[in-house]
Image (tube, rainbow, N blue to C red):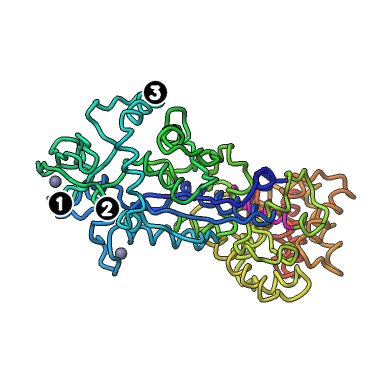
Amino acid sequence: MDWADELAASVDGPQVVNDSKTPSGTVHIGSLRGPVILDVIVRALRKHGVPTTLLYGVDDMDPMDAQALLTPDAVDRYMGAPLAHIPDQVADGHASYARHHAQTFIDVFDGLGVRPDRYYWMSDIYPTGDVDPFIRTALDRAATVREIYRRVANVRHPDTWLPVSVVCPNCGKVGTTFATDWDGETVAVACKPDLVTWARGCGWSGRVAPWKGAAKLPWNLEWAAQWSLFGVTIEPCGKDLSTRGGSRDRSDAIAREVFEREPPRNVPYEFLNIGGKKMSTSKGLGAAAHTMAEVLPPEQIRFLFVRHRPESVIEFVPEGTDAIPRQFDEFDRLARATDGQDVKGELPSGYDSIFAYSLLDPAADVAAEAAAYRPPFGHLALLVQVPGVDVLARVEAEKGAPLTDHERARFDERLGAVRRWLDGYAPESAIVAVQPALPAAADELDDEQRAYLGALADAVASGAPTSGDDWQAAIFAVANERGLDGKRAFGALYRSFLGRTNGPRAGWLLASLDRDVVVRRLREAAGAGQGATA
Ligand SMILES: [Zn+2]
Ligand SMILES: [Zn+2]
């Protein structure tokens, strides 16, 4: 079993799986680990026959605290205001800043096959009054809340502090108000110019009844209230929030001791560490999701997260390495194993589930997907670099049949990823240029290598191999016959065709070229330098 099946086998009764997110800024590749884990848990629960609901919250009553995201004229007015109350900073028709940014991540999730049963917006929930009982309880038990902050997180609020953030009736900011003196119906509120460094309150003070959207709960309490409101039973949580004394610990304690409900089961998950200059951001979450999606199609992004257990750190260095081709290869290997074919190497536990949960469509025919023909990434990367090659025709020759419509769609997607990989990520060694004439490097071939190339030319002159695998086999077979080690055999081929000493899989290289061209070049190289030494 894979990790998600293990989890699904351990629960009792219907499950409500939840996560929520503040809608601001760019969606980074690293921040997609949570949503994919969430979705895989839901798929696993449903596969095990557990009735399951997936909810996703938009925490859009959170205050704006990132100046860089506002146009300059909006900074004074909106820093500290609820995200839901800030106008869209891009004139493209969203009702608010929050709706604009939430749409970005909703679209990204959808593209990854992560489709919650319901998105709920805290700016819609508060006005209904549904949160009011939790606000009342929090205010009644404010001393307990303050004690929890002290005990769990070593955060000391003044004894007058109350666990509620009132929206200032004068300036509309929520990040700048300080509430005291709960009398059972209202609180005293001061909108302070200097409460926080990132926003300036207007100085208003007065009493406010904190109901129906006039106030919000501070984050840790809002989180715990969501669990009670929606009956959440499972909520995975990133490492940044799962540390001891961190956000999750506080909310767990608030759920138990203030709202008197057992918190949902946590599935703590680790970071994705993305290496490479292009990928790094100040927040360490890696490239923007839409940039990464150009080179990793949705199934590959899912696979990146599904193949690792949540508690393990993922180190991913896509730039200047073959990490991306290797990941495609591993995906293809698990597909073949799921199809019942023999594969090299050890298989991960639950490999067939890992493959199935990586597929975009939860209702996909897993057996048909596993049996589909997938051209190896490295092979495509080579074919697209050889001038005049009809890549699709070569791939269909390798398969031995035309691609199905479904395979064709996947092929197009993969080919796009290959081109972008070569464009911006591939190491120097993956970039090849087949030389139009015998390269000078062929002069450095020794006698054994030249004899080998001649023998290979003879072997393939009649009945040449067609597929890359057949070529690879022929290259090895002739080398074995002549007692030439593989490294020198390949070196001879790279010198003769690429003018250098290394390169991608030689069988694919030769298969991508016209057979007559290959035979002529092999014979030429076999004779190279002999005139000079004779
Ligand atoms: Zn917009
Ligand atoms: Zn104010």
* Viewer-nearest of discs 3 and 1: 3
Q: Is-magenta flag for residue 333?
A: yes
In the rendered image, residue 415, in percent from the top left (x then y), is placed at 59, 65
**Helix, strand or loop for disc 1:** helix
Marks 2/1: CA distance?
A: 20 Å
Q: Is residue 294 left or right of residue 479?
A: left
Residue at which label 1 appears: 77
Q: Can residue 426 be seen?
A: no
Marks 3/2: CA distance?
A: 30 Å
Residue range (magenta): 323-335
Residue placed at 30% from the left, 57% from the top? 127
In the rendered image, residue 16, in percent from the top left (x then y), is placed at 54, 51
Tag of residue 151:
3
Q: Amino acid at mark 2?
A: Gly
Sequence-wise first label, 3 or 2: 3
Q: In what quadrant does ligand 1 lie?
A: bottom left
**Helix, strand or loop for disc 2:** loop
